[in-house]
């Protein structure tokens, strides 16, 4: 898969975000971290040598790959999404690593905007 020109924003700054970030950087993807906690978010961004911004500033970064790594939207709070629906667009691929529920509110909003979506089942199976 050719990843040249991909701009990825990773929502979250935990272990999964770290692993995904380093993997994408190895493949030449331009990565940014969006997180609500400045300490964890900026620390991971420093480790990845990439930009960090508050989660509420996510609409200011033009990303064509958006990866959600937080527990927001996980059962039983399945109606929650870490970002508003207006950030999604048809030229975006969106992944949520949550696998329960398989179709999160985050993915439903992305699909409604025409984005390609990837659920967390593959992440769960291969971890």
Image (tube, grey):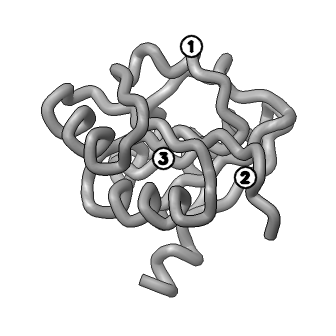
Q: Which mark is residue 117?
A: 2
Contact? badges 2 and 1 (CB < 8 Å)? no
Direction from residue 119 to residue 14 in the image, left or right: left
Which dot marks residue 51?
Answer: none
CA separation, marks 2 and 3?
A: 11 Å
Q: Residue at x 41, y 83 (%)?
A: 127
Residue 125 x, y percent position in the rendering: 50, 85
Task: Tell me the crowding category of disc 3: few under 14, some 14 to 19, or many 20 or more residues within 10 angstroms, Cα based.
Answer: many
Q: Residues within 10 Å of mark 2 (few under 14, many from 20)?
A: many
Q: Residue furthest bottom?
A: 126
Q: Which mark is residue 68?
A: 3
Callout 1: helix, strand or loop? helix
Mark 2 or mark 1, earlier in chain: 1
Residue at the spot 50% in from the left edge and 26% down from the top edge: 83
Along the line of sight, the residue nearer the viewer: 6 or 114: 6
> Is residue 92 or residue 5 the one in the foreground?
5
Residue at image point 50% right, 86% down: 126
| Residue that carries the numbered disc 1 in the rendered image | 60
Q: Quadrant of the N terminus?
A: bottom right
Question: In this picture, is 27 found above or below 32?
Answer: below
**Element carrying mark 2:** strand
The local secondary structure at tag 3 comes to strand
**Front position among marks 2 and 1:** 1
């Amino acid at each position: 898969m050719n990843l040249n020109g991909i701009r990825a924003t990773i929502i979250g700054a935990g272990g999964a975000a770290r692993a995904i970030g380093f993997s994408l950087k190895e493949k030449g993807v331009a990565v940014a971290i969006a997180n609500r906690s400045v300490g964890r978010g900026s620390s991971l961004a420093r480790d990845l040598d990439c930009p960090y911004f508050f989660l509420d500033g996510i609409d200011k970064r033009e990303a064509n790959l958006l990866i959600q790594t937080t527990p927001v939207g996980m059962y039983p709070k399945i109606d929650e999404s870490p970002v508003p629906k207006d950030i999604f667009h048809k030229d975006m691929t969106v992944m949520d690593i949550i696998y329960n529920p398989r179709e999160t509110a985050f993915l439903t909003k992305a699909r409604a905007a025409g984005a390609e979506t990837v659920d967390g089942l593959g992440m769960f199976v291969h971890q």
